[in-house]
Image (cartoon, rainbow, N blue to C red):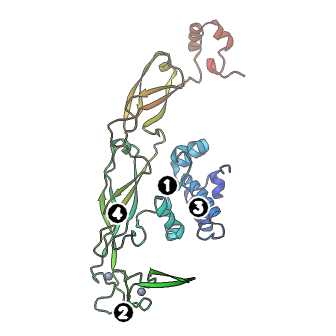
């Protein structure tokens, strides 16, 4: 299927404001999100992904400018080789009120890590009885962090036993009844007959969520949950060489257990900002620069942007347009290795738009009669395109 223009996808005009982009996306997202399109969820998901890709680009002024100028080629570098994936989607937080709790997002949340949906405990439990929930968060870092590493401090959602009700969830002094659904067991048994055998499954009680209790008057501080949400600060060490989208696991830094179990884990997805001027391919970095004709002809030194800084590049005399130069060890490091890739600089040569009569004369003289005959110095000078 050929890619559709992002403005068409969102049904907006080329000069739509950021607010218009946002409201168009919200409207369509509500219409197409896969949880409401139960008849054909696969098609709805495709559609939803297309909308989200368009939004990812058009909601970001910098990406939008590149898309306006260069089309899909201008934003290729922001996504992986296979194009846009949910990992590239950084605006899910904008939709959380709308979609945050849906099954579709819960699934995304568990299978692929989707940025922005992070920052909430995942499900109730991490699957191990008594263990606290895992938490997923994402952090955005400049591209240079792939070279230098970084130690960002993250605000991680967590929870704590409510001190007001000491975790019971009941207003101080009020009684807690046995849950009538499970008779205080917290679990319900369901048996099914299959021929001669009987299948018994034990499920968490849906009414009391496994606590076995019914609270008559809930604690106002925690609204009966027995736990209060809080934010804790966690310093994360991001190693040099980190790839965009990589996930770091910090054991036991998730939500504390509400019993005697171990805390859950914290998963931190690292999102590296694309710089627009540096492209990454493994450990090598690629960039482009422009030099004036005189530098190409006579040589000289120019400054080029590296990933973290600027470096001097020597241009030898007689440098041809589109020549590539290699700056050793100015690329990206390999994880847990001192080795670094190279920075490859493609040099474009700027030709002057027009020459003064004196310059034309001198160049004619220098380059010989044939040049003068083939390209007479009129409006565009020597460098006007022929035909
Ligand atoms: Zn409480
Ligand atoms: Zn119950």
- Secondary element type, mark 4: loop
Choose top left, top right, bottom left or bottom right for residue 177.
bottom left
Q: Observer-nearest residue: 70 or 377? A: 70
Kindly tell me whether residue 98 is visible in this rendering: no
Q: Residue furthest right?
A: 387
The quadrant of the rendering that contains the C terminus is top right
Q: Do the residues labelled 4 and 2 touch (CB within 8 Å)?
A: no
Q: Do the residues labelled 1 and 2 touch (CB within 8 Å)?
A: no
- Secondary element type, mark 1: helix
From the top left corner, tell me how far across and down residue 333 is, in percent. 37, 39
Q: Is residue 354 above or below residue 66?
A: above
For the point 40% across and 62% down, the residue is 136
Of the image marks 1 and 2, the number of the one nearer the N terminus: 1
Which residue, given by chain and number where applicable, does mark 2 sit on? 177
Which residue, given by chain and number where applicable, does mark 4 sit on? 265
Which residue, given by chain and number where applicable, does mark 3 sit on? 25
Q: Do the residues labelled 1 and 3 touch (CB within 8 Å)?
A: no
Of the image marks 1 and 3, the number of the one nearer the N terminus: 3
Position of 123 with respect to 176 (left or right) is right
Which residue, given by chain and number where applicable, does mark 1 sit on? 87
Real-space Cα distance between discs 1 and 2?
Answer: 45 Å
- Secondary element type, mark 3: helix
Q: Do the residues labelled 3 and 4 touch (CB within 8 Å)?
A: no
Choose top left, top right, bottom left or bottom right for residue 35.
bottom right
Of the image marks 2 and 3, the number of the one nearer the N terminus: 3
């Amino acid at each position: 299927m050929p890619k559709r223009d992002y403005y068409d996808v969102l049904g907006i005009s080329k000069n739509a404001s950021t607010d218009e982009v946002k409201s168009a996306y919200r409207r369509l997202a509500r219409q197409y999100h896969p949880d409401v399109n139960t008849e054909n969820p696969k098609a709805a998901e495709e559609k939803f992904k297309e909308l989200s890709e368009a939004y990812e680009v058009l909601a970001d002024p910098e990406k939008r400018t590149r898309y306006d100028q260069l089309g899909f080629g201008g934003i290729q570098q922001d996504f992986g080789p296979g194009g846009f994936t949910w990992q590239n989607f950084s605006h899910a937080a904008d939709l959380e009120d709308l979609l945050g709790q849906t099954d579709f997002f819960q699934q995304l949340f568990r299978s692929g890590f989707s940025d922005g949906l992070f920052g909430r405990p995942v499900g109730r439990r991490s699957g191990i009885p008594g263990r606290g929930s895992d938490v997923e968060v994402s952090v955005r870092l400049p591209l240079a962090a792939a070279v230098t590493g970084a130690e960002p401090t993250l605000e991680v959602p967590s929870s704590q036993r409510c001190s007001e009700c000491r975790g019971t969830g009941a207003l101080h002094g009020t009684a807690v009844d046995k849950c009538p659904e499970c008779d205080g067991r917290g679990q319900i048994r369901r048996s099914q007959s299959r021929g001669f055998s009987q299948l018994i499954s034990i499920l968490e009680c849906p009414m009391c969520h496994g606590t076995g209790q019914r609270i008559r008057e809930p604690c106002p501080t925690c609204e009966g949950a027995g736990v209060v949400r809080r934010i804790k600060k966690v310093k994360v060490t991001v190693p040099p060489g980190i790839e965009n989208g990589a996930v770091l696991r910090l054991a036991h830094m998730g939500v504390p257990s509400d019993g005697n179990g171990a805390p859950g884990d914290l998963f931190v997805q690292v999102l590296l900002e694309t710089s627009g001027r540096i492209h990454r391919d493994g450990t090598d970095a690629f960039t482009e620069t422009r030099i004036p004709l005189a530098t190409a002809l006579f040589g000289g030194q120019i400054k080029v942007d590296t990933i973290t800084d600027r470096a001097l590049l020597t241009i030898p005399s007689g440098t041809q347009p589109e020549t590539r130069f290699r700056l050793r060890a100015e690329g990206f490091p390999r994880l847990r290795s001192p080795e670094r890739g190279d920075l490859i600089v493609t040099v474009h040569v700027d030709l002057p738009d027009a020459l003064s009569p004196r310059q034309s004369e001198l160049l004619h003289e220098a380059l010989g009669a044939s040049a003068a005959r083939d390209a007479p110095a009129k409006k565009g000078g020597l460098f006007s395109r022929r035909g």
